[in-house]
Amino acid sequence: MRKRVAFSVLLAAALSAAAPAGAQSLLEYVGECVPFARAASGIQIYGDAWTWWGQADGRYQRGNVPRIGAVLAFSKSARLPLGHVAVVSRIVEKRVLMITHANWSRLNGERGHAEQDVTLFDVSERGDWSLVKVWYRDRNGLGSSIYPAHGFIYGTPDRNAPATLRKARPSAELTARQPDYVGSLIDAYAAR
């Protein structure tokens, strides 16, 4: 019994340490995408979302191939003046992912909420994730907007990174136990 109580206390402490400030669980978070992505991915970058790609240079490995736990850095655009960051939670197929992120859709009329295992569809001509569509709760499907993205920031330190930079550890709450793969594929390919 004592071990079970000690484990419960440690688990609660770990979850609250991994969750952004003010949330007991990653999925209870309400706020901006940046602190959420940092907590969900373990990647220690600060500042506006559009600056993450440049800040990762020389610190974390980057690329255009999705990996679970990687952060997709959206570019600054007219629709996203501060950019956006989202964490890859599942790879469904070559051009369909699930992401976990915050501050995208409205929930009860309010932005900022965390969303788990949201469909992300690569609509770029080259299949390099430079243009994407994102599931939007208000439409109950993929939004009609196409967003430019820089690429993926991996939690692995770059070879030029300071020796103190450690490999990032994504949150255990990054994905659900039973994500809706079929729904994700329907969302992506019905929106073509």
Image: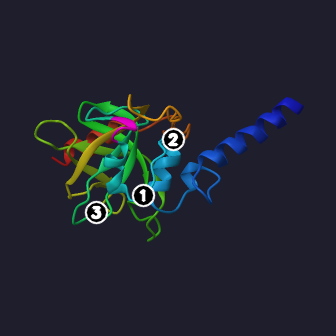
Q: Is residue 26 left or right of residue 130?
A: right
Q: Residue furthest right?
A: 2
The local crowd at label 1, few if under 14, some if 14 to 19, many if 20 or more residues have their Cα within 10 Å, is few
Q: Which residues are magenta?
A: 57-61
Residue type at tag 3: Leu
Residue found at x 28% / y 32%: 65
Viewer can see residue 1? no
Q: Residue furthest left?
A: 125
What residue did someone put label 3 on?
Answer: 80
Q: CA distance from mark 2 to mark 1?
A: 15 Å
Position in image of residue 115 (x %, y %): 45, 52
Secondary structure under the numbered disc 2 in the rendered image? loop
Residue 190 location, x and y as percent? 20, 46
Q: Nearer the viewer, mark 1 or mark 3?
A: 1
- Observer-side mark, 2 or 3, equals 2
Is residue 102 depicted above or below 98 in this figure?
Answer: below
**Identity of the amino acid at label 2?**
Gly
Picture quadrant where residue 22 is located: bottom right
Q: Circle 1 sits in a helix, a strand or a loop, which is it?
A: loop
The answer to whether marks 2 and 1 mark residues whose Cβ atoms lie closer than 8 Å is no
Query: Between tags 2 and 1, which lies in front?
Result: 1
In the image, 14: left or right of 103? right
Please, what secondary structure does the residue beneath circle 3 have?
Answer: loop
Q: Which mark is residue 47?
A: 1
